[in-house]
Image: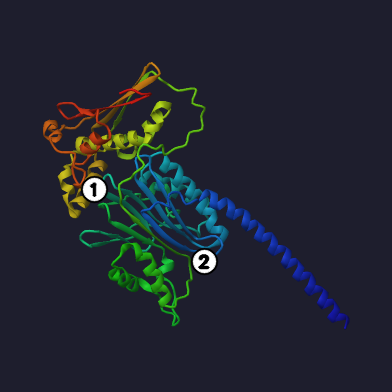
Amino acid sequence: MQRLRRLQQTIVQQRDQIARHNDYLLNEQRVAKAVFDRVAHSGCLDAPNIRYLQSPYALFNGDLLLAAYTPSGDTHLLLADFTGHGLPAAIGAMPLAEVFYSMTAKGYGLAEILREMNAKLKRILPVDMFCCAALLCVSAQRRCVEVWNGGMPDGYLQAALSGQRTALTSQHLPLGVLRAEVFDHATQVLPMLPGDQVFLLTDGVIDTCGPNQQLFGVERLERVLDANRHPLQLIAEVEQALRDFQGQARDDVSMVQITSQLPAFLGVPAIVYSDSGQCSPRDWSASFEFRAPSLQQFNPLPYVLQLLMEVHGLRAQGPVIHAVLAELYSNALEHGVLGLDSRLKRDTGGFAHYYQQRKERLATLKYGFVRFSLQVEPIGESGRLLIQVEDSGAGFDVARVMARPLDLDRLSGRGVSLVRQLCPAARWAPDGRSATVEFSWGGLA
């Protein structure tokens, strides 16, 4: 009887200790979850052209889904899958979200964002952890989607008019595996017209296990995609197919679908500034010349845009200025310095060939430059900004290009039309080697 009494006391003590420890863990997880949700917030996932489903396997989702607008109106979307669940997955997700949101808001491209995310994860994660990820830049203005897939299942680009489906296969190792000097940030660029859709998913979908230990698999998923007639219902149809399969999820299930559509928010600042607004440079000029070694590996746009946004009167026009600068720089680099012909982009095959040539010519570039000349001048309480972008290329027939209508529906030759639409004061030198745009603030005409 004495031994039974001692056994009962031991059991009660252990039960109370387990209960206290469980309450402590739950409280820790609640605090960590609150911090995680604030850092890895949804961004613009509530946009009307984005639909998604996330079914967490644990309190902390091992899958990470983020979306944000760039200053020029493009959409960056990240779907990532960390090894493990719970707190270990959240530890890697928070710095990844911080890099994604901060660099997207500053106007960096996918290459710079990928390099920074990989370097940070490589530095902080243990060797048995990594992050499979798919990163997209959907640009309705440029009629294209830029894709990087490292270790994720195939995504799919569905053309609205032709019905053609293109697989977005993994061509890279996951983030956090390779050192910075051997990491490959090369992206794939595909045409994407308004109405076209990209569908991404994590391996929790295809790895769902049925009652007889069969996996849902890629073939069943593609049958659902083939049978889909209403794109807005695709995620619901995949979810129903998983239920009909009577499968048991062994991992987080995440799906996201984004439709290309023209942005309706250009002119709204993408960055919230915290300074008082009392100190602003109002009368200055600067010139920057980026030569071949810099053009090969450096994106000057965030640097130049940050300098211009120190002028408080220009901040309300930040997205438009960024969009115009991006087009002028792209034209100067690709058509001027690299000598690429935009007519290659008239179809899907030409699109791929164009960007392959861009990559090859940029890698072997020895000479050439792109020069930015900036001038800010006060006019009473108002002001004016003049930007000139010049390149070392052969130029183009300005009169012939200016004679074209402002047609933005074609895949090629859209840069000049877009600049003219966003900035009616834009003008080009007769030799086609430099362009000048003008922005004003404070009530100037």
Q: Is residue 61 left or right of residue 400?
A: right
Q: Which residue is mark 1?
A: 355
Q: Residue at x 59, y 53 (%)?
A: 34
User: Which residue is at the front of the view, 370 or 97?
Assistant: 97
Q: Position of residue 204 (x, y in %)?
A: 44, 67
Query: Is residue 311 visible to the viewer in this orientation of the structure?
Result: no
At numbered mark 2, what does the secondary structure look like: helix, strand or loop? loop
Q: Amino acid at mark 1?
A: Tyr
Where is residue 188? Give x, y as percent: 29, 52
> Which residue in the protein does label 2 denote?
57
* Front-most of residues 440 and 74: 440
Q: Quadrant of the C terminus?
A: top left
Q: Amino acid at mark 2?
A: Tyr
Between label 1 and label 2, give the one nearer the viewer.
Answer: 2
For the residues marked 1 and 2, what is the alpha-carbon distance in whole angstroms?
A: 39 Å
Q: Quadrant of residue 201?
A: bottom left
Few, some or many C-alpha atoms within 10 Å of disc 2 (few <14, some 14-19, many ≥20)?
some
Q: Residues within 10 Å of mark 1 (few under 14, many from 20)?
A: some
Which residue is nearer to you in this view: 43 or 233? Answer: 233
